[in-house]
Image (cartoon, coloured by chain):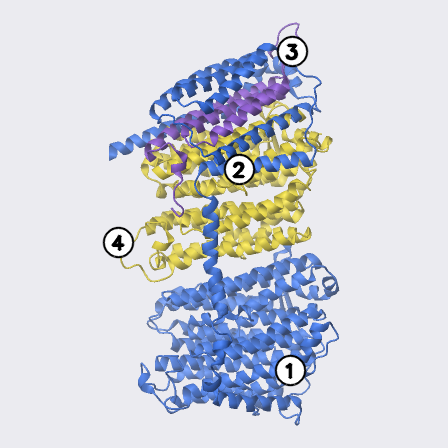
Chain colours: A yellow, B purple, C blue
Amino acid sequence: MNNLAILPIIIPLISGAILAFVHSKVSLSRTLAKLFMLINLGVVIYLTLEVINYGTIILETGEWVAPYGIVLVADSLAAVLVLTTNIIAVAAVFYAPHSLTEAKEKHYFYTFFFFIISGVSGAFLTGDLFNLFVFFEVLLIASYALIVLGGEKVQLRESLKYVLINVFSSILFVTAIAFLYGVVGTVNMAQIAERVQEVDQQGILTTIGILLFFVFATKAALFPLYYWLPKSYIVPNPVVSALFAALLTKVGIYSIIRVFSLIFIHRPDLTHEAFIWIAGLSMIFGVIGALATNNIKLIIAYNIIPAIGFIMMGIGFFNESGMSGSIYYLIHDMIIKTALFMLVGIIAYVAGTSDLRKMKGLIHDYPLLGWLLFIAAFVLAGIPPFSGFIGKIQLLKGAFENGEVVIAIIALGTSLLILYSVMKIFIRGFWGERQTNNKLEKKPIFGMVTPVIFLLACSTILGIGAEWFVPTIESISSDLLNPQNYIDSVLKE
Amino acid sequence: MEIIISILAGIIFAVAVYNLLQKQMIRIIIGTVLISHAAHLFILTMGKLKRGQPPILSEGVTSYTDPLPQALILTSIVISFGLTSLMLVLAYRTAQENKTDNMEQLRGKPNE
Amino acid sequence: MIFAIFIPLLFALFVPLLSKLKERIHTGIFVLFIPLSIFLYFIRFIGKDFVPIKQTYQWIPSLGINLDFYLDGLSLLFILLISGIGTLVVAYSIYYLDRTERLGHFYVYLLMFMSAMLGVVSFDNIFAIYTFWELTSISSFLLIGYWHFKERSRYGAQKSMLITIFGGLSMFGGFILLSVIAGTTSIRELILHADIILNSNYLPLALILILLGAFTKSAQFPFHIWLPDAMEAPTPVSAYLHSATMVKAGIYLVARLSPIFSSYEWFFIIVSTFGIVTLCWGSYMAVRQTDLKAILAFSTISQLGMIMAMLGFGTKVAIFAAVFHILNHATFKGSLFMVAGVIDVQTGTRDIRKLGGLFTFLPITATLALFGTFSMAGIPLPFLNGFYSKEMFFDSTLQLTQSGNGIAQFMVQIIPYLAVIGSIFTFVYSMYFFFGVFGGKKHTMKLAKSPVEAPIGMLIPPMILVLGVIGIGLFPNAFNGTFLAHAAEAINPLSSAGHIKFWHGLNTPFIMSLIVVGVGFVLFKTKNVWKKIYDILPGRFSFNKVYDQIIKNIDIVSTKITNKYMNGSLGTYISLIIGAIVVVTGFVMIQTGGFTISFDNLAEITIIELTVAVLIVIAAIATIFSNSNLAALLITGVVGYGVSVLFLIYRAPDLALTQLVIETVSVVLFLLAFLHLPKMRKRSEKPPVKLKNIIISVGFGALMTLVGISAHSSNWFEPISDYFLDTALPIGGGKNVVNVILVDMRGLDTLFEITVLGIAALAVFTLIKLRKDKEEAD
């Protein structure tokens, strides 16, 4: 029963290994990948239901009791995020064959893909800080492999920067863990939390917390650490970008949520207050970046940053509405960013360019694509009745409850500019007369569009059917605000 | 001694970062190699130095050094090695495709 | 009843199918039944004994978002407008839109709008209202962009979207603020808790945010600029959304919420000021236009301003007049838009400079326009509804009493004069519209088509509206008690109209009307003389230019900012990142007094360790100065081997061994890679760059050392490792505790550490292989 917690990590790991052996048989790989992914999704759905209905599942690996061995803690936050990850992964695995060349598929795409899923799920589930580092490395190294897949000139150039900055932050991560171990003598997160609480987070502890924050903020692409993100996210294949956008930055923000709701919560005047400003600056600079370019992929890539800002804002408020908003927005953003990266991937494919200035009138040939983008733009901007709206309501509520008026207004203004930046693609790329000198014949895109429809449907259900999810999210939020629950369930006190 | 090792690790960090800020790929990679050494030294220091025997259980020894940091360093060394080798090949391939190993010439254009 | 709101949206799903039949049956004919049946369904609620009806449908109760349907007099007025005008507009569109157009799209958008607008006016829940509010903006965007192959359409669509969604989002903020202050999301409960809201510190902010929503939607000065550009939409859309219904959503909102705010004097000041300025500016600018639809657009702006002003006054008379004028405006302006459409279709132009003398060619259209324009001008004739509400407006401006602050007092003084000035220009543009098109000399040769009267089907909808103008004019009291009074009461319970009369004697409002007609007539006749004034006011300034500049600058400034730091340089990125880490972490360390150093319980310092450490430092620093691949490699190796010696000294034999092996393998790898990488060059940084690099790296190193020392000096807890030492043998079954930890207690780490290695190997292989394959393929 408790072993359920490790399945979302192990199934993808084994799947990835199996797929490495059959890598040369493309159609077999595709079928197996889809099959494994669906099995994993099934398991994760089961896990999530168990956790939501019967409470946190804790697995002490190798039967070593916490805090000594590595524990996996499938609490409802982790379960819900693993579920979202798998929903995205299913969409991606169905999109991939249409987007990738066979050569890339043969060169272990599916293996790396499953390893990323394994690493991400591990990062969500683990209750051990050093183990979190290991899972970070798993997902990062798989991401390095994926980002260079294809080996184009530009791709290599941007990948190298991506890798170097991430390597730096990984090392900083290990160092910060070492410092923390020096003070509290443990790497189990629940026990760290307990001990930090015992000494009231005095002395050097807040400083170490800030170092950890910088580690996670670099991965999460928060202000002022996001420089590596935009360019490197547009060089790989769209399906890879979609995965990165949905998962990698989100693991970073998840870690911030975890660490700053569980461990470093005793000096909110220094930490959480600062988060609000960081959130605001991320929103502003992120959306400015999105407005600054005519490259449709870059527009979406920059839009990752303000979204992270939105999530960060709720963590900064650290009240029930804000936290619920952050989590709802996190789930929403994982889904919609995947859909948007897939969409711009298709658009660039059918238009033969990602330069917005070179496209127009696409709606004549690709009406479905156009309308999907249109809806996705409103989903992204948090216009009702889609998922972003629910998160935004809670976030802004959290803001006003704490009297944080300035950030609320920045958030509203950013929403408008986000909408504008994406709507530009619709107005300039899809509206207008059909391009006459069109050497490009109409391309079949149905296979690529289906996963997008699936994701947008998820997003709509999260919005219109919010009542099915909000109570769960609110209970997650209230758990996060009462870290003693987590500590007790891990340490069994 | 712990303080001296901390200073040593700090110096290695400084040198490593200085290398990271260079333009030439080789220097940057040397930077990443150095920086992991610094991190490992810090982990070791945090577990107290030279308290007792190596953590290999033997009769009559009551005091051992802290084994956990050593385990963590081992994991970290292996991971760093994987990263370094990947980075070397990546750097080599990048230099080859782009015909330069100067990072400043690998900026790319805005709006690309 | 709640279902009625969604009928258009549901029906829209079938429109694409029905539009396949458009060659045989115009899609509009199917669509016509939707608003018609809604109209017929709701018209039965008109009556003296009407009581509000309530229905609730739970949507997201956890967040207090419910579809609380609440039908009171005000909602009923709007629902009937939406469905009634909607019916006429759809009927009109059947003739206006050719079957070659994309009818399916048109009607889907229109039906979407209909549902959205019905939702806005019939829900009691603020978030439900917001949901439908944004949907009206979206459908309006699509309708303006209906002919998206035209540059102007795209421009207009984007503009309206940006401005109305800007307003929508700020209104959303205001709503959330209200719900946080009062703890409820229902408007009726908010009204009950008005005292909490009025005493809140956030009152001004909430008011401003909400009014921004209302003002942008209802095209109030200076947000009115989107409305003239919205005229790129097909004319039925202009008549429907951009005159009769959607632009009144802002009016509706202010009316709805005025019970909360009306006792707050800034509500009076802001709403009346914006309203009255909009009235004057709109009518003044309307005279300057040459496009028929632009005249009507500015006229709409001005009339909306007038209604807004009356809501700001908030008195009994003003509220009733506002409600009355909402109805009247819909009738005469709707008919005038349809007339403009007829002229456009029949003559091929809407440019008033090319038109003139059309009375003889289009007599029916001209007659309709006559009633419409004269009613709009407020000419005192007993069969024109416009006069009644206009006179009530004058009356309300005279009855203002404000005991508040100086600004409010001043407003009370000048409002009647501004009202007259605005109305004078209203008179002028009404005459200008009518006589410019139908009067004067004919110069039909300028026209693309020779004008003939429109088909009767196209004239019936405006005819019905003009019948409304006359009907309300002749029998105003038929609409009063049964209908308008309920709407007014919904806004202000004290408001009831008494009896609407044409002749009140020669009182001040009537004199004001006479002044309007007199001065207006003179100004109309002498327009050519004074029109140069437009070169001074607004002169070359226009709010459009402001908007265009903003949009242009958003692009330019954001590009400038972004290119400045997102320059693709790894060095810049790393400097910025590490710089931020050093500054912020350093600040926090100082702020929390984090630094501690303790010399207790330290390991002793021996010469050998010290020597190794010094060697490592020298080697490390030497990497910076080395200028040869091989040398750099060797001294990097020295650091690595030095570290393994330290491991050995510090009782970590396994580590020392691993480090040794890995270092050796690394050196080999480096050798291989260095063969292929270009030779090391001398570092060539300019001194300032060098200084910056030194500061950053030394800062970072120092920070790490300080944190490290502090962490080490504050070990307040026993590490958990004792447990490992105790259990390694009995439970783990091994003597080498490090090994037991790796394979057992932290086996998961090790499993994934191996995975990392495996992935790295695969990735290296792929990096090299994929290239080879490519070369072979080439």
Q: CA distance from mark 2 to mark 4?
A: 45 Å
Q: CA distance from mark 1 to mark 2?
A: 62 Å
Other-residue count near label 2 (Cα within 10 Å), few / some / many at <14 / 14–19 / ≥20: many
Eyeballing the image, is A468 above or below C371?
Answer: above
Other-residue count near label 3 (Cα within 10 Å), few / some / many at <14 / 14–19 / ≥20: some
Same chain for marks 1 and 2?
yes
Residue at the disc numbered 1: C416
Q: Are marks 1 and 2 in contact (CB under 8 Å)?
A: no
Q: Nearer the viewer, mark 2 or mark 4?
A: 2
Q: What kind of residue is marked 1?
A: Pro
Q: CA distance from mark 4 to mark 1?
A: 65 Å
Q: CA distance from mark 3 to mark 1?
A: 95 Å
Q: What x and y, as percent, mark residue C765?
A: 36, 27
**Pointer 1 or 2: first along the chain:** 1
Displayed quadrant of residue C653: top right
Q: CA distance from mark 4 to mark 3?
A: 77 Å
